[in-house]
């Protein structure tokens, strides 16, 4: 795969966690943290890092503040006016659309949207996204006025529904860590990556499945017949090996050396998706790259059914 762009995150979420700790220690509002010398030092250090490595950075996000558009606008202007930078502005689901209008009016052509993945109310999120993208696509042919980046966005339905330019996610790593891989569905003998049939199937392939795996998908060993063949054909097409290990039971001893039980262990002979998280990450990245290539090209027009999300 050919990676041509470098996107720098600001660490805003880490700062948000620090603001919570600051509030507990000082018995104050968490937003007070964003007026401290510690925070302003972080902002200045962030700007220094960008300027030092700017040659290798294509896009860098503003140091936004979850829950306070006023503060993230202040940070945006500090990075621009004090440091001479032009970061990507960020708005969060639930924030007043006036901030988006302000960004578009000021000529920002690449805007970040956060909070989509964290929202617990799907209907409210869809209603907000409808309003958000109607503003972004306020043109005669409903084409977007700016590129929109979705932070932490893995919803296939939302990515297909709205004209996002880019999204980021660590889902392929999380799945791999839990022993999972993503498999495309088939229709009429062909792999499908878009539409309702394009939702991936998550399958457990680890030789040592954990309890958490069962909440994500079915283990490969439970598939039969044609389904199992389809899975194996996809794995084979990626070139990532299954992997080979030797399983053995070892005695568990206490501090005195007495045997208290047995534990199933494995010795990896050949790394693969069954015994190596890196291999699972690799095969998941191949899936997501194939899925990305199947998406409609940007810019694409907004289409929202009448009466939905109004």
Image: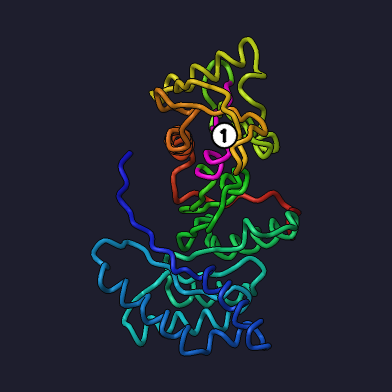
The residue tagged with tag 1: helix, strand or loop?
strand
Residue ID at (53%, 89%): 35
Q: Nearer the viewer, residue 294 or 304?
A: 294
> Circle 1 is placed at which residue position?
180
Pick the quarter of the image with the C terminus: bottom right
Instruction: Find residue 246 and report its horizontal and vertical position in percent.
Output: 48, 20
Residue 44, position as x, y percentages in the image: 37, 82
Q: Residue furthest front?
A: 256
As displayed, is residue 156 above or below residue 82? above
Q: Quadrant of residue 134?
A: bottom right
Instruction: Kindly indicate the quadrant of the structure image that contains residue 261.
Output: top right
Nearer to me, 234 or 135:
234
Name the spot of residue 18 as percent of width and height, x first: 56, 75
Which quarter of the rendering shows the N terminus? top left
Task: Tell me: 202 left or right of 310.
Answer: left
Which residue sits at x=47%, y=71%?
Answer: 89
The relative height of residue 28 versus residue 271 in the rendered view (above or below) is below
Q: Is residue 100 above or below residue 170?
A: below
Q: Which residues are magenta?
A: 173-186
Query: Is residue 182 within the magenta segment?
Result: yes
Residue at (48%, 38%) from the top-left corner? Answer: 288
Residue 248 lies in the magenta stretch = no
Would residue 303 appear left or right of 35 to someone viewing this image?
Answer: right
Colour mode of the rendering: rainbow
Q: What x and y, as percent, mark residue 285?
A: 44, 38
Q: Is residue 277 visible?
A: yes
* Residue occupying image coordinates x 38% and y 66%: 60
Asked whether 120 or 240 is in front, the reply is: 240
Res 205 seen here: no
């Amino acid at each position: 795969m050919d990676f041509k762009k470098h996107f720098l995150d600001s660490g805003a979420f880490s700062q948000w966690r620090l603001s919570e700790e600051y509030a507990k220690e000082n018995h104050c509002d968490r937003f007070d943290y964003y007026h401290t010398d510690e925070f302003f030092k972080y902002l200045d250090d962030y700007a220094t890092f960008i300027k030092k490595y700017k040659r290798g950075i294509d896009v860098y996000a503003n140091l936004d503040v979850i829950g306070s558009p006023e503060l993230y606008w202040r940070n945006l202007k500090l990075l621009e006016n004090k440091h001479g930078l032009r970061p990507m502005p960020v708005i969060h689901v639930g924030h007043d659309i006036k901030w988006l209008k302000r960004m578009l009016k000021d000529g920002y052509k690449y805007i970040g949207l956060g909070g989509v993945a964290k929202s617990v109310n799907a209907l409210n999120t869809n209603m907000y996204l409808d309003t958000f993208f109607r503003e972004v696509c306020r043109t005669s042919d409903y084409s977007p006025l700016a590129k929109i980046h979705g932070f932490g966005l893995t919803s296939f339905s939302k990515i297909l529904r709205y004209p996002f330019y880019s999204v980021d996610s660590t889902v392929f790593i999380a799945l791999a860590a839990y022993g999972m891989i993503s498999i495309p569905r088939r229709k009429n003998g062909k792999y499908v990556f878009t539409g309702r049939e394009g939702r991936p199937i998550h399958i457990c392939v680890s030789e040592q499945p954990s309890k958490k795996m069962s909440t994500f998908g079915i283990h490969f060993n439970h598939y039969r017949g044609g389904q199992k063949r389809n899975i194996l054909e996809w794995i084979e097409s990626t070139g990532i090996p299954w992997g080979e290990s030797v399983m053995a039971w070892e005695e568990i001893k206490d501090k005195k050396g007495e045997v208290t039980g047995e534990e199933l262990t494995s010795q990896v002979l050949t790394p693969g998706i069954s015994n190596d998280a890196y291999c699972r990450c690799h095969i998941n990245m191949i899936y997501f790259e194939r899925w990305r290539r199947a998406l409609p090209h940007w810019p694409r027009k907004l289409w929202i059914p009448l009466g939905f999300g109004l």
